[in-house]
Structures are given as structure tokens and as C-alpha cells.
Image: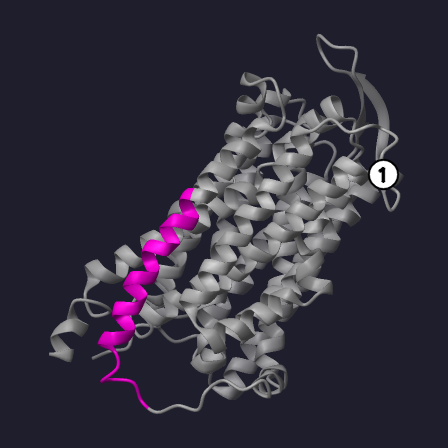
Amino acid sequence: MVEEINKTLRESKTARWFALGVVAFTMLTGYFLTDVMSPLKPLLEQEKGWSSTEYGIFTSAYGWFNVFLLMLILGGMILDKMGIRFTGIGATFLMVIGTSIKYYAISTNFSEASTIIGIKTQVMLAALGYALFGVGVEISGITVSKIIVKWFKGKELALAMGLEMATARLGTLLAMAISVPVAKYFKTVSAPILLCLILLIIGFLSFIIYTFMDKKLDISLEGQKQEEEPFRFSDIFEIIKNRGFWYIAILCVLFYSAVFPFLKYAADLMVNKFGIKEEYAGLIPSMLPLGTLFLTPFFGNLYDRKGKGATIMILGSLLIILVHTIFSIPAFNHWIIAIFAVVILGIGFSLVPSAMWPSVPKIIPEKQLGTAYALIFWIQNWGLMGVPALIGWILDAFCIVGNRQIEGTQHVVPIYDYTLPMITFALFGLFAILFAILLKAEDKKKGYGLELPNIKSK
């Protein structure tokens, strides 16, 4: 009887792909909010009077609680101790609460003289909401990663992770493409955030639906589970003693520091360097997640069937350097070049994650997987917190080359030269290649199987 039930769950393609679809939709709603403010930077400067430094403080808030309060690591340990259902519901609820605070902050007009620890009240409240959301979405991310391993280990693991990432990137695409039109239609910069809040509530309800499937899967696997020592807090030390773990974690933070913070400024780059109007400036960056919708599952399927995971990561890092080098050259200022560079960046952005995340279970035992993913995400959050603030400071300190008046208004905003920020992003890509090469050498020494297919031959 157990065998029959099991065949309707993890061994059932319909069941495991449906489970993937439900949790992937939840992550889509999270990614929508993560990037919804990126195309709105010029409007925040006009409507709310934010500077690039204040925008940088806000975007860096994503990692405040995760990094300094160790909330992400705590979430990973809770995941390994308490399980997927408890952790996932709590994390998705935090996303809703954080977004509610952020919407309140942006939709409320505060006095210019009102500050919190020297930062404008509006900026600080929005940042605190974003920081709380960051805890929720990052813990949701590691929970979903463990869910996928639970359903797809020994099967189409990299393809499943690729499809989940592609679905989540659709949230990024929507954020980049529709945030400004929605804000302009409703004549307020807070309107896209309200739309995000509604979608996040739906995503929260979707995850609750998944928990019923997860419980049935656990029941069906009771007869198959082998006795295994439970997770212990001392396992953290086993993880951090693993050199392969450090190579993949540092590669992760370097790679994502060259992509996600770039997206926070990509629309502003299109306005300042390529002369694209603000209402259309998010369209070209939105091509990046559009490309990943197809390429990440493609490269994941390739890894599942052919292997070469470490090689894929090296190639993706090379493309990151190429793209940011193109963006850093002042003479390359035609919009066609911008489209070309974003397309190449999309390929690189598909290559590395499609191989990196499915490689973690080859390096770390499954009982430690939640904590390992949490530690990697925690290290990554140092980059997601620090790099946007760094770029905002660089822009205000070194890159203002003039001022321009917004067409049809009295608003005057700075003109930025993005050469130095793009060189900074390219350097992150250069160091990412170094650690990808070190990871490949460590795999050859330890035999993790990163260059081997994920699908086990019968």
C-alpha cells in the first residue's frame, strides 16, 4: 500500500511537477517585490526627493536583519529542525508583513525634517519593511530549495531548480516592465507596491496549499526512510570545515553581487547613459529575466543529463565580465548595444545558478542542507546588502556630471556617468571566475561529482 501511495507522489511526475509549480509561484510573488523599486528610482527622486545615497541605503536594507541579526542562518537551522511546513508558512507570512510596512512608508507623506537616526523617516521605514521582507523571502528561498531536493533528488533536480528560478525571474521581469507604467497610471509611486502586496498574499495562500502535499509525501515515504542522525547544531562546524562549501558560497556572493545590485540601477543606467525615457527604461533590463525563463531550465536539463556543472559556472562568470565591460565603455551608448549586453548577461545569469544550486546537495549531506543553503544565502546577503549601498555612494561621490530637468515638470535631477559602477561590477565577475576554477579543482580532488550528470542511470 505504501508503495502504491508513493507512486502517486514523488514517483509521480504529475505530483512532483505540480508541487514545484505551487512553490515556484510563491517565489514569483517574492521576486516581484524584491525588484519592484528598481525602475522607480527616477520617480522616487522626483516624487519623494530621494538621493542616490538614500536609494542605496534602502536597497541595502534587504540584508540588514539577515546579515547582522543572523536571521537567515537561524531560519536554516529552524528549517532542518522544524521542517518545511512550519518554516515555509512563517517565512511567507514575514514577506507579507514586511511589504505592508514598506507600502505604508512609501504611500505616506512625512515631513522633510522628520528623521530616524539621521535618515529620512520615509526612507528608514521603507528600509525596515524591506529588511523584514528580506528575511522572509530568503528563508522562503532556502525552504523551496530543500523542497525541490526532497521531490527531485536523483531525478530532474537541476531542471526543476532551473524552472523554479525561471518562474521566480518572471516576477523580476514583471517588476522591471510594469512598475513605472502602473505608477504613472495611478499617479503615485506606491501603486506598484500595493499590487505586490496583493500578489504576496496570494503567494502565501499558495504555500499553505503546498503544505498538504508535503504532509502526504512524508506519509508516503515513512516506509522508505532510512535511519539517519537528526540535525545537530554542531553540524554547522562540519559544513564550514568543508572547503568546497566555501568555494561555492564565495562564488555565489561574487556572482550575485554583479547581477542583482546591477538590476537595482539598470533602469537608471538606461536613462543616464542610453538616453531612454523613464517610462521605457525598465523594458531593456526586463529582457534579462525573460531570457532566463528559457535558458535556466535548458542549462539545468543539460547539467542533469550531461554534467559539467563546474565548467558551466566558469563560462557564466566569463560572460558577466564581458557584459559589464561593455557597459563601462562610454562610447558604447546606443540602445541596441544595451539590448545586446542585457541578452548576454541573461545567458550568464542562466548558466551559473542552473549549475550552482543543484551542486550544493553533492557537497553537503541532506540533513544539513537547509543550514548549508542558509549559510550560502547569508554570505550572499553581505553582497546584496553592501554592494547597492556602495554603488549609490559611488554615484553621488564620483559620478554626477550635471543636472537635467524632467520634461514637463520643474523637477531637476542629477545626470550620472555609470563608468565606475560598471567597472566595479566587472571586478566582481573577475573574482567569481577565480573561485569557480578553485571549485572545479576541489571537485577533481574530492570527487563530489560536479562534472557528472544528476540523473542516476537505472
Percent position of residue 265, x then y: 68, 38
Q: Quadrant of the C terminus?
A: bottom left
Residue 120, placed above or below residue 23: above
Q: 416 above or below 208? A: above
Mark 1 — residue? 115
Judging depth in this view, the residue of 116 and 19 nearest the camera is 116
Image check: 345 left or right of 115?
Answer: left
The residue at 64%/65% (across/down) is: 71
Left or right: 27, with 298 as reference point: right
Q: Is residue 438 left or right of residue 111?
A: left
Q: Which residues are magenta?
A: 202-226
Q: Confirm whether the magenta stretch covers residue 237.
A: no
Q: 204 or 240: which is nearer to us?
A: 204
The quadrant in which the N terminus is found is: bottom left
Residue type at the position of mark 1: Thr
Magenta segment's dominant SS is helix
